[in-house]
Image (cartoon, grey):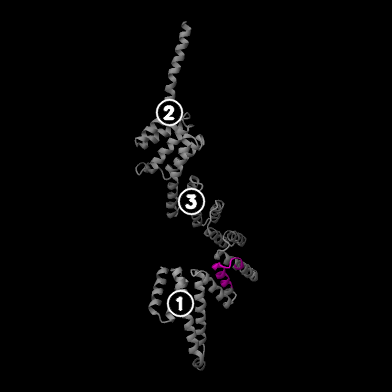
Amino acid sequence: MKKTFLTFAIGASLSAGLPVVVSAQTSAVTNAILNQRSGLLDKARVEIDKAIANEKTSGKAKTWYTRGEIYQGMLESPIYGKQLQPGEGLQKAVESYNKTIELDSKTGEFGKQAVAKMDNLYGFAFNDAVNSYNAKDYDKAIASYKLASQLKPQDTTAVLYSAYAYEAKQDYAGAKASYNQLLGMNYKSATLYTRLLQMAKQQKDDVEAAKVLQQALAAYPNNKTFMLEDLNLSLASGKGPEALDKISKAIAADPSNSNLYAVRGSMYDQQKKSDLALADYRKAVELDPNNFDAQFNLGVYNYNKAADAYTKASKMDLKAYQVSGKKLESEGKKYFEASVPYFEKALQLQPDDRNTLASLQKVYFRLGRTADSERLNAKLQSLKK
């Protein structure tokens, strides 16, 4: 009986001691939560860091989730945020929520909450990136944009801005990777292809430029910039007739497309076929009065006709001038007058376009519209500052 009693007593003693051990293991987490709820985030931080260092609690989702909340709270606090090193709060909050999800899955009690918390951290990462970019710390900006992208993988904005940061530091390989990542995310933007094309040109990589151009045309078959690039490429490689045939077929397939006529008009201009160019520009404007290129080029056509007439008159000797000089100048003036509505419409469509401003300013001057000429000249000077 005595032996039995002793065994029972020892068992009871061990059983009584167990809760004490468990309490010691979880007290740091409990204290961290209590301090967090009381707004004492500095003390909460000390306690949760203890729990993370303890092998008994470091493997629990609740511990990591609590750590994430505490560091996020400090990050958001104008007081406690000053106790953190630059980027520390965001980095540890993200690390904590990722660990929570790893231990608990995205559907677990704490994992589900961690996913929602991660979405809220996106804004902090993105703002850090913008501030770093503005400070011209492009490496830090890129790192923060990448973090923002990890927090919200479906969002394209951070990826796009990371490409801008890569370009700013002239890391074209990094920029290209970001732009191609966007393409993989089904991001639709003609500007994206334009940037890839410009980078290929800057690097004098003709093969890459041609490849990008074909991708751009496949995505935006009626984009006038890409069509002109394709035509110029064809012309530069001695394939002018092929290029003209290509654009004419496009017009046959889409006869109501104003841009196609404007592009073919530009091509005819390059080939010095002014009458054909004029017909296409007029058709482009007829289909779309807001086609800037067609309006501007119609202005240029009439401007050049006027300039030619005045040039011929200026080169005449006195006898020839007395016979037909005045007539040529009168003809030139009519062409200058004819150019005005086209240039004015083009300027209405793009008020700060310098070529339009300069051309119209000269026309106003030649027509004696001094006030209008001085007004446009003043605007030109202001744009140069």
In the depicted structure, whether residue 106 falls above or below residue 276: above
Q: Which residue is mark 2?
A: 26
| Quarter of the view holding residue 44 | top left
Residue 185, numbered label = none
Residue 189 belongs to the span the image colors magenta? no
Instruction: Identify the residue shown where x is 36% and y is 34%.
Output: 35
Q: Position of residue 104 (x, y in %)?
A: 50, 34
The amino acid beneath tag 3 is Ala
Instruction: Identify the residue shown where x is 47% and y is 83%.
Output: 333
Q: State the extent of the magenta-drawn residues as a range.
A: 251-267
Mark 3 lies on a secondary structure that is helix
Mark 2 lies on a secondary structure that is helix
Mark 1 lies on a secondary structure that is helix
Quadrant, the C terminus:
bottom left
Disc 2 crowd, CA 10 A, few/some/many (<14, 14-19, 20+): some
The amino acid beneath tag 1 is Val
Q: Which residue is mark 1?
A: 340
Is 259 or 154 nearer to us in this picture? 259
| Quarter of the view holding residue 25 | top left
Q: Determine whether label 2 and label 1 are within 8 Å by CB.
A: no
**Could one spot residue 96 in this view of the protein?**
no
Q: Determine whether label 2 and label 3 are within 8 Å by CB.
A: no
Q: Which residue is mark 3?
A: 158
**Marks 3, 1: nearer the viewer:** 1
In the depicted structure, whether residue 380 falls above or below residue 190: below
**Could one spot residue 42 in this view of the protein?**
yes
Q: Residue furthest top?
A: 1
The amino acid beneath tag 2 is Thr
Q: Earlier in the sequence, mark 2 or mark 1?
A: 2
Q: Earlier in the sequence, mark 3 or mark 1?
A: 3
